[in-house]
C-alpha cells in the first residue's frame, strides 16, 4: 500500500500544466454515468415488478425496512464505482482528442513510468470491466430483492 501511495504522489507532482484541469470533466461525467447506472437498475426492477412503475418518487421513503434498504442501497451504490472508472476512461479519451493537451500531458507522463495514455487506458479498461461486472451484479441483485418499496 505504501508503494502505491508513493507512486500516486509521483504522479500528482508531475501535473503542472493547466491542461490537467480538463481532467475535472470526469466529475460531472461520473455523476451522469452513475445516474444512468441507477436508472438501468431501476428499469430492470420495473421489468421484474411492473406494479412499481411510476413509483420512483417512493424509492427511499422514511421508515424503510431493512430488506428494502439493502436492496435500495445496492441499486444506488452498485453503479457508483463502475461509473467513476468509466468516467476516467472517457475523460482521458476526450482530452486525448485535443492535440495541444495530448502533447503536454504525454510530456508530463514521460517522467513517471506507467502513466502514459496507453498504459493508463489499459489499466482503466481492466478496472472498468471488473467494476462494471461487479456493479451490474450488485445493482441487478438489489433490483431483484426490492420486492416492496417499504
Image: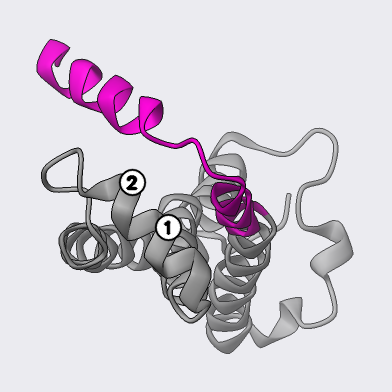
Q: Main secondary structure of the magenta part?
A: helix
Describe residue 62's horizontal placement relative to residue 122 as left or right. right
**Residue found farthest to the top:** 2
Q: Residue at x 66, y 65 (%)?
A: 35
Q: Is residue 125 above or below residue 110?
A: below
Q: Is residue 108 above or below residue 99?
A: above
The residue wearing badge 2 is 108
**Residue 104: which disc?**
1
Q: Position of residue 76 (x, y in %)?
A: 59, 53
Residues at marks 1 and 2, CA–CA distance in whole angstroms: 6 Å
Q: Quadrant of residue 122?
A: bottom left
Mark 2 is surrounded, within 10 Å at the Cα level, by few (under 14), some (14 to 19) or many (20 or more) other residues, namely some
Quadrant of the frame with the N terminus:
top left
Q: Residue at x 11, y 17 (%)?
A: 3
Which residue is at the front of the view, 47 or 93?
93
Find out whether residue 19 is within the magenta segment. Answer: yes
Q: Residue at x 18, y 38 (%)?
A: 112
Q: Secondary structure at mark 2?
A: helix
Which residue is at the front of the view, 133 or 74?
133
Number of callouts: 2
Mark 1 is surrounded, within 10 Å at the Cα level, by few (under 14), some (14 to 19) or many (20 or more) other residues, namely some
Which residue is at the front of the view, 32 or 105?
105
Asked if disc 1 and disc 2 are in contact, CB closer than 8 Å, the reply is yes
Amino acid at each position: 500500500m505504501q508503494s502505491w501511495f508513493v507512486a500516486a504522489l509521483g504522479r500528482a507532482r508531475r501535473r503542472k500544466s493547466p491542461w490537467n484541469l480538463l481532467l475535472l470533466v470526469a466529475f460531472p461525467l461520473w455523476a451522469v454515468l452513475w445516474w444512468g447506472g441507477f436508472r438501468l437498475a431501476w428499469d430492470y426492477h420495473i421489468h421484474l415488478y411492473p406494479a412499481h412503475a411510476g413509483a420512483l418518487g417512493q424509492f427511499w421513503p422514511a421508515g424503510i425496512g431493512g430488506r428494502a434498504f439493502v436492496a435500495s442501497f445496492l441499486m444506488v451504490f452498485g453503479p457508483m464505482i463502475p461509473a467513476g472508472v468509466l468516467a476516467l476512461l472517457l475523460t482521458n479519451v476526450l482530452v486525448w482528442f485535443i492535440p495541444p493537451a495530448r502533447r503536454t500531458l504525454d510530456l508530463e507522463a514521460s517522467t513517471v513510468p506507467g502513466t502514459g495514455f496507453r498504459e493508463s487506458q489499459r489499466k482503466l479498461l481492466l478496472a472498468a470491466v471488473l467494476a462494471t461486472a461487479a456493479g451490474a451484479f450488485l445493482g441487478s441483485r438489489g433490483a431483484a430483492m426490492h420486492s416492496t418499496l417499504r
